[in-house]
Amino acid sequence: MTHDKPEEAMTFGELLALIAEQQRRLTVLENAFANLTFCLDERASQLLVHNLLLEAQNQNHDTQLQQQFAHLAEEIKKCSGEKPDDLQG
């Protein structure tokens, strides 16, 4: 399958290559986002964590996505030097 002809069937090898490409792109985005959090002041970091925790409780998201939001919030807390419970409430 190519981007020019999306209606064509994709081989298993092409699927694996596509998955690998998407994983690399996701890794780049995760690293970029993690590095951007170092540019935030304390208040902005707290707001970001709070919003991520709200997303982690959003019932419109499946359980796995909720867990990913919660995990990201915890990672940002670690980067900002906050204890995991400091930003609750």
Image: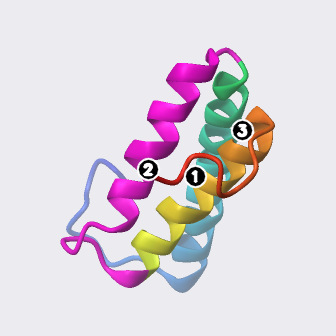
Query: What residue is drawn where x is 67% and y is 39%?
Result: 28
**Mark 3, mark 2: which one is toward the viewer?**
2
Q: Amino acid at mark 3?
A: Asn
Disc 1 target residue = 73
Q: Amino acid at mark 2?
A: Leu
Q: Which residue is mark 2?
A: 52
Task: Tell me the kind of residue under disc 1.
Answer: Ala
First of labels 1, 2 by sequence position: 2
State whether residue 62 appears in this view: yes
Residue in the picture at 33% in, 68% down: 57
Q: Earlier in the sequence, mark 1 or mark 3?
A: 3
- Give yes or no for residue 9 being in the magenta stretch: no
User: Residue 10's mark?
Assistant: none
Could you say where residue 64 lies in the image, as x and y percent from the top left?
Answer: 45, 80
Above or below, 89 relative to 82? below
Q: Which residue is mark 3?
A: 31
The one nearer the camera, 64 or 12, is 64
Task: Of the two numbered discs 3 and 2 on the same chain, state the one appearing first in sequence.
Answer: 3
* Residue 60, quarter of picture: bottom left
Instruction: Give the left or right position of residue 58, taking residue 13 as reference.
Output: left
> Would residue 83 be found to the left or right of residue 44 on screen?
right
- In this view of the protein, which residue sits in the foreground, 71 or 50? 50
Contact flag, marks 1 and 2 (Cβ < 8 Å):
yes
Density class for disc 1 (Cα within 10 Å; few <14, some 14-19, many ≥20) is many
Please give the range of residues in magenta: 39-63
- The N terminus lies in which quarter of the figure? bottom left
Magenta stretch: includes residue 55:
yes
